[in-house]
Image (tube, grey):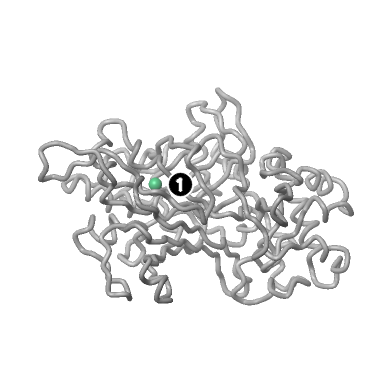
Amino acid sequence: MTVSLNETHDPARRSFVATANAPDADFPIQNLPFGVFRPAAGLPPRVGVAIGDQILDIAAASSSFAGLAAAAGRACPLPHLNALMALGPPAWSALRLALSRALSAGHGEESLRRHLTPMAQAEIEMPVAVRNFTDFYASIFHATNAGRAFRPDNPLLPNYKYVPVAYHCRASSIRLSGTPVRRPRGQRKRADEAAPSYGPSRNLDFELELGFYVGVPSALGETVPIGKAAEHIFGFCLLNDWSARDVQGWEYQPLGPFLGKNFATTVSPWVVTAEALAPFRTAAFTRAASDPAPLPHLDDAEDRVRGGLDLTLEAYLVSAAMRRDGIAPRRLARTSSTSLYWTVAQMVAHHASNGCNLEIGDLIGSGTISGPERSSWGSLLELTARGREPISLPSGEQRGFIEDGDEIIFRGLAEKPGYPRVGFGECRAVILPAE
Ligand code: CA
């Protein structure tokens, strides 16, 4: 990762938006994530930046910006981030710098306040027009746990430590956080049943993932060198790869996931830029001494040292009964992206290693992020041993898998001593009964 630290990362910088300076704020001035919003119902959607509990209308606020930042501002009166992404990393960086200066305490307050909308009043929309969606399987702990559920004797297949395993999934069913998800129907067959039946999934699950958006495309037929791969990523989000385990378990051989996965994917609204996460870069996963080295096209000295990301992701569940009784969501998992076996750069380089072209707005998922501890497992498949060991809820209910009316909530944040917390906000959706 070549993004270096600059004044936008200065931990001492504060905003004239007071809520951005609270210690537990997700959106301090060091974050500046991009999204799409309508300031009020009926107004056209446009690109904004989150600051504290406010959203700044970038196109309106950037009239005083110069150079690349001004050009970036002109790409913002649009209902998606794709045009801003197309301007490339120098423009993203120039816009971030101009926004950081404009929103800092003692600057542009009077002229900018009128371009702020309280987040609670705004209508938030999908940030990116996504044409392609790929989901990796980059947590070795998840791959081992999930493999054990489907293949008890042979959990981790021999390709895992060579190939960043992934599958192509469906862009058409990606929805923004807050949009309800309908329980899918499908073919499911229990081990004790002789033949499958078609009906509502009985084993609906979530997958706690990090998503990232391609901002720099690659041409068909060309590869992306591992040392340049991270520069193709514009930013990051929380991603829930909803999974119907019973449908998945019946259909997945030999071609992999299909209808057990593609009925819905939920993403968080704010895209936290790669530049905002530069302070949270860390070493790549430490491979066991007995593991093979990555093949040369997936190996890079700087990526080994700085290619990892130290982010904390959490999953919560609140049932309909808990909501009714005012009971707080129950945390199911708290995990770290440091447990990903493959780095973002390795996933991107692998994706293009056959000449498959990356497009602006492509969404890539990390795969379920699970760590070594049970409390860090990022799906119910793992947490409840495929439903056999249900989780108790504070309402007295139990859950092996997700029930109708349950809401799954993800939160994500980056923290380190002496640095303001950079948060992702939330990624949430409630499950509706099958049609
Ligand atoms: Ca997944």
Q: Which residue is tagged 1?
A: 265
| Residue 154 falls left or right of residue 192 | right
Q: Quadrant of the C terminus?
A: top left
The image shows residue 168 at horizontal and vertical percentages of: 43, 35
Q: Position of residue 252 (x, y in %)?
A: 28, 36
Residue 257 against residue 145 in the figure, above or below: above
- Mark 1 residue's CB less than 8 Å from ligand 1: no
Circle 1 packing at 10 Å, graded few (<14), some (14-19), many (20+), is: many
Q: Is residue 32 left or right of residue 174?
A: right
Q: Residue 310: x and y, percent?
A: 51, 61
* Residue 115 in which image quadrant: bottom right
Q: As shown in the figure, which amino acid type bears the numbered disc 1?
A: Thr
Tell me which residue sits at (49%, 63%) in the image. 411
Foreground residue, 37 or 362? 37
- Picture quadrant where residue 13 is located: bottom right
Q: Is residue 174 left or right of residue 292?
A: right
